Image (tube, rainbow, N blue to C red):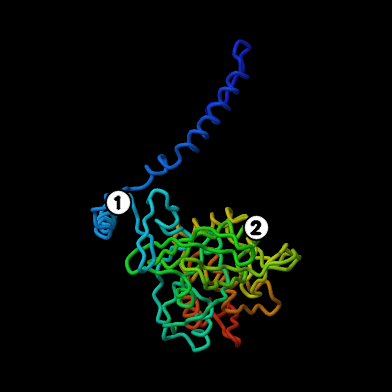
Amino acid sequence: LVVLMPTTFMQEVSYRTHAIGFVVGVAAALLYFRLKRARIRGHETVELPDSVNRNLALFSLDYALWKDERFDEVGPAGEILWFLRRLEPPQVQETPGHLRYFKIEYEPADLSEDMQILEISLDDELSEIDMPPVSREAVDIKLIYPHWRAGTLPLSSRLRHLFPMAYQAPRIRFILVDGETGEKFPGWVVQREKYVYGLSEYYNEKGLFPGSLMTIRRSETPGEVIVEADTGREVREWLRTVLIGSDGNIVLAMLKQNVSSAFDDRMAISVPDPDALDTVWEKNRKERTPFEKIVVKTLRELSKLTPQGNVHASELYAAVNLSRRTPPGPILALLNSRPWFSHVGDLYFKLDDAAQH
């Protein structure tokens, strides 16, 4: 319709006649469709003679689609479903940049028992620690920046059983349901990379941010998963806020922000300008900033926000993930192995600059 709209108007042209012709054409098309609906719809399906074995025909069709690279199998275990590959979101065909993890070698056994318990509670899909399988109807999680920015959820050990899975298909399409409104929208399980995509609009509509609390719940309807956020009246709260300094690095400050969702006090971080923060992310990637340098700088920024300068390990984990995707394990192992990270109790740490120098 935009293409047919004239860009200039000429006196010798009868635009009313054109408009009448357009309306009559649309009306005629709708009438024709109504009269020939069955015939038109019939061309959208594959008709098979009664003599053809239905199961054999379905098998042959599935095999043909499997051999055709234009189609992707997206059904859960026990169900074969096909999707046109070019219509799939790019974020399920290729891992979003904020979720890409460049492996950091460490020994999980070196973590203390308290550290292992904390790592399990953080529900990071990249954790290497052995986690016992769970089977709950609902699981509570805390959002971190990479998943908030990418519009994803972690496919962690505690969450996997709530989502549809497949034996071979790398991607599974399913339905997400807003637990508050009942609104349904498509979601994608990306098995190998361990994340669930499709929540960007949901996060924006609910006013969620890094540190917000969410509940993922099993649905009674197969192929559906319920997501819930504890939202309410907007209030002003003091939050750690990300600013970008004149040198292009992250600066953290305690500022009042409008908040309408429940959040974890230790992991809540307001990000007023995600695009500016992305430049820091890209800078660290291009310059290959050493992991330990990022941890030290982040701990130093966080320590400025409290009189004692003590920082909890979960605070550090959330803040490090503002500029580099990192599971808890490498961060906790680093805290446990360097003398300049002084443990002051209950997984609170303090930076000892004298020991570092």
What number is the disc on residue 54?
A: none
What number is the disc on residue 272?
A: 2
Q: Which residue is mark 1?
A: 69
**Three-letter amino acid code of the residue under disc 2:** Pro
- 107 lies left or right of 300: left
Residue 306 against residue 45 in the figure, above or below = below
Q: Sort mark 2 into few (<14), some (14-19) or many (20+) by Cα contacts within 10 Å.
A: few
Query: Residue 44, located in which quarter of the rendered image?
Result: top left
Of residues 294 and 66, the one nearer the viewer is 66
Of residues 149 and 71, the one nearer the viewer is 71
Residue 352 against residue 214 in the figure, above or below = below
Q: Residue at x 57, y 53 (%)?
A: 275
Q: How many marks?
A: 2
- Dot 2: element: loop
Q: Is residue 1 visible?
A: no
Instruction: Return the x and y of residue 337 as percentages of the image width and height.
Output: 47, 82
Instruction: Return the x and y of residue 12 as percentages of the image width and height.
Output: 60, 10
Residue 9 against residue 176 in the figure, above or below = above
Instruction: Return the x and y of residue 214 as percentages of the image width and height.
Output: 59, 71
CA gap, disc 1 to disc 2?
A: 41 Å
Q: Residue at x 65, y 63 (%)?
A: 270
**Three-letter amino acid code of the residue under disc 1:** Glu
Of residues 178 and 20, the one nearer the viewer is 20
Of residues 124 and 114, the one nearer the viewer is 124
Q: Is residue 288 visible?
A: yes
